[in-house]
Image (spheres, rainbow, N blue to C red):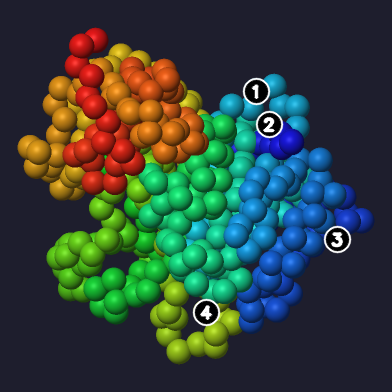
Amino acid sequence: MIRALTLTAAALAASLVAVPAHAADTPPRTGFEESDGARWTSQPEEQDFLAAVDRASSRVSVARIGTTKQDRPLQLVRIGARHAPHARNKVLLVCSQHGDEPSGREACLTTIRDLAYAKDERTRRFLDRTTVLVVPTANPDGRAADTRGNSDGVDINRDHIALKTTEGRTLAAVIRDQRPDVIYDLHEYGATPRYYDKDLFDLWPRNLNTDTAVHDEAETLSQAYVRPAAQGAGYSTGTYGIWTDPVTGEPIRQVAGDGQERILRNMSGIKHSVGLLIESRVEPLTDVAEAVNNRRRVNSQLAALKGLSGFTDERRGRIEAATGKARLEGYADTGPVYVGGADNDPPEPAEVIQDPPCGYRLTPEQYTEVKDELALHGVTTRGTYVPLRQSLRALVPLLLDERAPYHLAAGEPVTDC
């Protein structure tokens, strides 16, 4: 079973430079730290590191939540005061969905350690009120092979609707069971010099089914917290997926970052979490040694995480109000559902279900085929009937309406409520 864990925002920032809880204890170090950035932490080193942190701190628990095709563990780390009565806010860090993007994973591992060993009052208070959840390596097989996809070559970050991969299914179960208020997804990107070459890019959920207040909190996380924190540490920032004119700074082309629901950034918003994608630049900005550049990649991620911590602590009430309200609004069963478009791309008329049905009726064969995925998403069913009147109202058509681009089954719309 998974033991309880909690985290807060100012605590995360403070914890990154915190003092060990017991001076006699020597905090473990990652393989990346031991090599001063010359190599990435191996999977056996990660397991030893997490086990050592788990043993040393009552704030931390590590649980195996899945197993990959190549028999590597998928793990969930919980951090926080074990019996904190006021702990409500939950933050989920998802690290290295793409196996060839390791810097976020390294930042997650050291953050786990620093939170576990911190003894300052601010961090303790933060952890009394927040639960920090970390999936330190969301794609262990891909990380071992240094590949974007998993051992079957599947991009996990395109599997958050279909849930065909063990990794995607495991993350869906974590989000369903934990209902995090914030989902922070750590990645890396390849630069296109002059047009697309910041130290860090980030992006919120663009999917139009994201509740307005949740969407606005995600934009606030990006623009008022993560970017200023990174810039304050000397790192350049920008909006993921947008090329800009090197002279004017104006956007000139969108190359990524749309509203498709199968990406975790967008699925976070659909499931009523404040989502943010963060991408550090792989290539060096200048001609430096590989280890120096690797440290920049990780340190820029750590700088951005400090912004996340400040957001979580300072806007705790607003975050909880936004996510809590969004989770209830589906029961009112009102308003359109969007099967296309984005917050910067108005949908075509055919991409708007203006008057959604009461629900969808599946055949017995369809239900047998998709029932496990519906359950993993947290969608409520009544036998073969799937009503829209539920917390995940907008997700139902994305899964079952034939107009949705990534639907699992074409259910029969039921209009007689």
Identify the amino acid type marked 2. Answer: Asp
119 left or right of 246 in image: right
Residue at position x 82%, y 56% from top?
52
Q: Residues within 10 Å of mark 2 (few under 14, many from 20)?
A: many
Residue at position x 41%, y 51% from top?
159
The answer to which image quadrant residue 25 occupies is: bottom right
Q: Earlier in the sequence, mark 4 or mark 3?
A: 3
Identify the amino acid type marked 4. Answer: Asn
Task: Answer yes or no: is residue 37 visible.
Answer: yes
Q: To which residue does mark 1 refer?
A: 86
Q: Secondary structure at mark 2?
A: helix
User: Where does the N terminus fall, quadrant-wise?
Assistant: top right
Q: CA distance from mark 3 to mark 1?
A: 31 Å
Residue that lies at the very extreme toward the front in this rendered image:
365
The disc at residue 128 is 2
Question: Above or below — where is 81 with respect to 242?
Answer: above
Q: CA distance from mark 3 to mark 2?
A: 24 Å
User: Closest to the observer: 34 or 189?
Assistant: 189
The disc at residue 26 is 3
- Give the image location of residue 231, x and y in percent: 42, 61
Identify the amino acid type marked 1. Answer: His
Instruction: State yes or no: discs 1 and 2 in contact (Cβ < 8 Å).
Output: yes
Q: Earlier in the sequence, mark 1 or mark 4?
A: 1
- Give the image location of residue 71, x and y in percent: 67, 60
Instruction: State yes or no: discs 3 and 2 in contact (Cβ < 8 Å).
Output: no
